[in-house]
Image: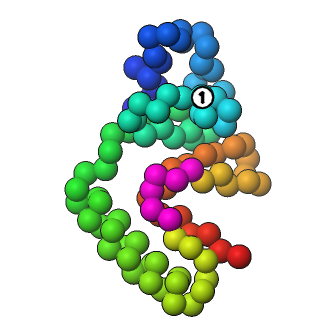
Amino acid sequence: MPIAAAVSATETAREWPDQGAWTYDDYRRLPDDGWRYEVIRGRLYMSPAPRPDHQRSSRGLFRALDRFIEDRDLGEVFFAPIDVNLPGLAGWRPRSGGLAWWCC
């Protein structure tokens, strides 16, 4: 869902960038209001919390991946929500993935 209702009562829409122009600094200014925000190619999206079937699948995948990574000392696995900044791509793309693996 694109942002529309996320602007708080004390802020006006003019204080937020146009869709397509969102930056990491804009993203970090968003309120901690329980919504899950994500910026994709400069556009801000809001989404509800995942459904139970998604959570069950994510939990199983996390357990298997975490055990594999930990047993081999290959890094760490993190569960969502966690911001992921993928540098070197065309434009900044903060993502809030379900699982993230950090190594090195």
Please indicate, yes or no, whether residue 68 appears anywhere in the rendered image: yes
Q: Residue at x 77, y 54 (%)?
A: 88
Relative to 46, say whether 70 is above or below. below
Q: Residue at x 68, y 32 (%)?
A: 25
What is the x, y in percent for residue 94? 60, 46
Q: Residue furthest left?
A: 52
The residue tagged with tag 1: helix, strand or loop? loop
Relative to 58, say whether 80 is above or below. above
Relative to 67, say whether 52 is above or below. above
In-image side of 98 versus 84 (left or right): left
The residue carrying mark 1 is 29
**Residue 80 part of the magenta-drawn span:** yes
What is the x, y in percent for residue 42? 62, 34
Q: Residue at x 33, y 68 (%)?
A: 59
For the C terminus, the quadrant is: bottom right
In-image side of 2 versus 25 (left or right): left
Please indicate, yes or no, whether residue 22 appears anywhere in the rendered image: no
**What is the span of residues highlighted in magenta in the rendered image?**
78-83
Q: Residue at x 38, y 77 (%)?
A: 63
What is the x, y in percent for residue 30? 54, 29
In-image side of 87 versus 36 (left or right): right
What is the x, y in percent for residue 93? 63, 45
Which quadrant would residue 72 be assigned to in this image?
bottom right
What type is the residue that disc 1 sits on?
Answer: Arg
For the N terminus, the quadrant is: top left
